[in-house]
Amino acid sequence: MSKTIEQYFVDWENSAFGYGYGTGEPHTLAALKGFFDALGRPDNPNAYDYRILEQKLTPTVAWLMINILCREDVIEYGTSPRGGWLTQAGEALRAFVDAHSVEELDALTERRGGYASCCRDVCNCGDNSVLGPACPNPFWDRS
Ligand SMILES: [Zn+2]
């Protein structure tokens, strides 16, 4: 049973953040959207410069997002995380976030009873729960 793109986003959000309990999500999702809005360098529209992120998000939010999104393989970098770019999964995530308002994203993350959420390393949406990269969530980098 495959999931919708909205459900893949819910699983990604729950894995990357997940501790909002209906109160934190509008803030973490606004920071995520703000991060994508602040992307763009002359050489690459999907790249960031930490100085721009600091200016637009505040240094605190900018560096928290860089840390979380590096760990989630949404962004990668060469010599320094002060400047990096989106991975393929990051580009998919950006396209989804760009197409939705914070309010719409927040509404998606409201918990629903009986929903079988998947994690990055554990899939619950197949016939059996399996360990490994079985869930084809486009927001999780499999490379
Ligand atoms: Zn799954």
Image (cartoon, helix red, strand yellow):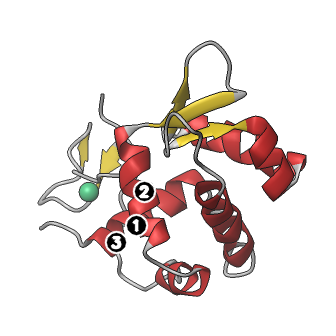
Nearest to the observer: residue 53 or residue 27: 53
List the residue tagged with mark 3.
Answer: 7
Q: Quadrant of residue 89?
A: top left
List the residue tagged with mark 2.
Answer: 93
Q: Is residue 100 visible?
A: yes
Q: Quadrant of the C terminus?
A: top left
The local secondary structure at tag 1 comes to helix
State the residue at coordinates (59%, 30%).
Answer: 84
Q: Is residue 103 above or below residue 62?
A: below
Q: Quadrant of residue 103?
A: bottom right
List the residue tagged with mark 1.
Answer: 96
The three-letter amino acid code for the residue at tag 2 is Leu
Nearest to the observer: residue 120 or residue 85: 85
Image position, residue 76 (x, y; %): 52, 29
**Mark number for residue 71?**
none
- Whether tag 2 and tag 1 are in contact, CB under 8 A, the answer is yes
Q: Quadrant of ligand 1?
A: bottom left
